[in-house]
Image: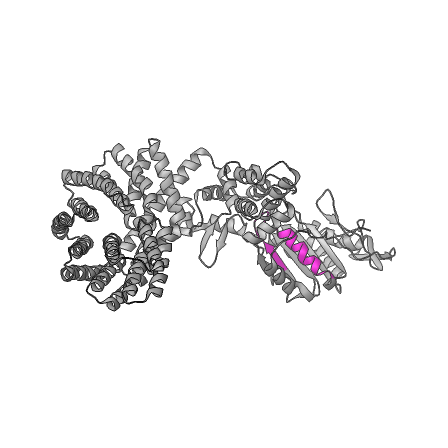
Amino acid sequence: MSNESTPQPDGVSYGDNARDNIAFTGGVQGGVYINRPSAPPLPPPRQLRKPVADFTGREKEIAALLDALRNGGRTGISGISGMGGIGKTELALLAADRLRDDYPDAQLFVEMRGTDEPPLAPADALASCIRAFLGPEAGLPDGVDDLTSLYLSVLSGKRALVLLDNAADGEQVRPLAPPQGCALLVTSRLAIKLPGLVRVKLDQLNPEEASILLRQIAPRVTPETAGRICDLCGHLPLAIRAAGSLLDVLSDLDPAEYAAQLLDERTRLESIGAEGVETGVEASFNLSYARLEPETARVFRCLAVFRGHFDAAAEESVCDDAGHNRLSELVRRSLALYEEKTRRYRLHDLARLFASSRLSDAEREEYRSQHAAYYRTTLAAAEDLYLKGGAGVGRGLALFDREWANIEAGQSWAVSESAGGNEAAARLYIEYSDAGASVLELRLHPRERIPWLEAMLAAARRLRRRDAEGNALGNLGNAYAALGETRHAIEFHEQALVIAREIGYRGGEGNALGNLGNAYADLGETRRAIEFYEQALVIVREIGDRRGEGADLGNLGLAYADLGETRRAIEFYEQHLAIAREIGDRRSEGGVLGNLGIAYKNLGEPRRAIELYEQALVIDREIGDRRGEGNALWNTALALDKLGDRAQAIACAEASFKIYEQIEDPNATMVRERLKAWHGQGAAKNERQDLLGKIKRYIFRR
């Protein structure tokens, strides 16, 4: 006789029907059941199928379930919640299979149809369990209360496990709480609430587990390709099973080509398909989506515009969801995910694609516009915190890092709409580029900043915004200077200077003069650079720009250091350091400490230089300034070499070289050559001095 249940048309599972010595058949007379002789007892009901043979991972969750349910546990009730396709049913079947010996009298299974409309009624679920013992023809009372009493009576004294799969909510499940000695295991897309319930919440598989599962289903897939496919499936078990099954049955489908197909977000759900699974990923999401109230469904669609995770304030603003009540309902239904530690929300990647597919064109335009506007404000807030200095530097950078995925998405939308002639989007894009100039310069590589700035320049010219045009030109000059393209940088700075003077923008004029000084210093025209710095210094002092004043003082220090006037350079550096600390400018503080270190090294005080480099290194690492970190390590290497500690010098230089390579810093080539010379003991003294001069000026100019 089979131990597996056979689903019936009404959705209630009937297994092998064991009878007690007295069967309750017939009707009710005066509220008392008539006892009639029973047929010979049948084996205990065993309605649970075996879990899939390739079940992978979830060891922590399995242990939690076994601990909660073994020997009745504390309450004998446990629930597994999570989004559709996450593997709740298979986990429940696996746990139940391992608990067979703990519950020898029965293992019952009821499909609660929680995603159907309507779901299975509690009375029908109770009747299903009772008839597993009394037989399909048993006459049963109609009311839930009477059925619950009979259910408890039938299970009393037994060791039985009841698995309620795909429950709708706690109200549907509550009447089926078993008596002492039995266990109840519930799966649901919602977070079910029951007295004493021990909840296990499932998230996606980790990358290693996901890859193992895929390769068990489709062994011909290489580990590398399996990793790519699993990433694109969001490590969702249902999607991985469907993708793996498709590759298994279609032997002419190249796994690498299939992975390339999945890159297209517009067709990814369709490409994953439904091979080897009862319900495809898209259909699985639709089961939950179809049960949402219209306003909650609208908010779910709106969430498609977010990239990565987001906080409640963002959702409330972008999705017009006061108090994020609709978002909380989506979390309850496992359509949105919440991380308690960070207090942030996200959609699973495939849930986001599903939600996006349900957006109308009008909704998409409205929500993306609101999203872009909100995160431009967020970028400005990060910049403001950073510029306040002190503790604000770290908070501003942390805010930027936390919201970067959404900031970038908002910027991308503004760029695309601006290019299409949307003037509101063009204005918003200009604001994006201006709002976060400092944090963007610190966090983005120059090659990443250049497209932002070119798009800003185009938008400014289209809107005839000369102020924004000048800002874009100046920042483009700085980006090209960082790449070592000095002549190109000068062209941009000269254009920015013309515009600043034309519109009477003194701050822009001071910036352009200072930037031109930097460029001519890079070309070795130090005296000319000093002239620009001195003109810039007059302007920034006139307008009270303390940050600009500090930068120009520091640059004058670098220029006099280039002329060999080290003591005079130190005077400028110390003025710069005082201003940086006064306004809390941690990045400039790190830079000027490095400059002072170079000066004292040149005065023959390498130990004092190393102390200053170490202070700079702490700041650079604190704020995530990778270029500054590489600079501090490299200059430490030079000082250590001067002290005769070649081994430690090489270690610092190698760490510096690794950073320079990662960020594509032009000085990587020079450091590589120095390392070769050090290893070969063949560096000429005059060659070392030339290299020091180049690195000194480029690295620490702020």
Task: Identify whether 433 is placed above or below 149.
Answer: above
Please give the name of the residue rendered at 59% of the width and 48% of the height, measured from the top-left corner: 237
Q: Nearer the viewer, residue 161 or 609?
A: 609
Residue 351 image position (x, y, % from top left): 52, 44
Q: Nearer the viewer, residue 167 or 445?
A: 445
Residue 177 in sight from this viewpoint = no
Is 121 situated left or right of 40 in this image?
left
Where residue 630 sits, quadrant-wise, is bottom left
Residue 211 image position (x, y, % from top left): 58, 50
Is 472 situated left or right of 528 in this image?
right
Query: Residue 403 in magenta?
Result: no
How is colour applied across the structure in the image?
one colour
Q: Which residues are magenta?
A: 78-100
**Which residue, as the protein is rendered here, is positioned at the far top?**
421
What is the total number of numbered labels drawn onto the structure image? 0
Please give the name of the residue rendered at 16% of the width and 38% of the height, measured from the top-left corner: 498
Where residue 104 sits, quadrant-wise, is bottom right
Query: Residue 86 in magenta?
Result: yes
Q: Nearer the viewer, residue 362 or 575?
A: 575
Residue 499 in sight from this viewpoint = yes
Residue 97 image position (x, y, % from top left): 71, 57
Task: Identify whether 75 is placed above or below 268.
Answer: below
Residue 278 image position (x, y, % from top left): 66, 42
**Which residue, as the protein is rendered here, is positioned at the far bottom?**
607
Q: Nearer the viewer, residue 632 or 376?
A: 632
Please give the name of the residue rendered at 33% of the width and 53% of the height, measured from the top-left corner: 673
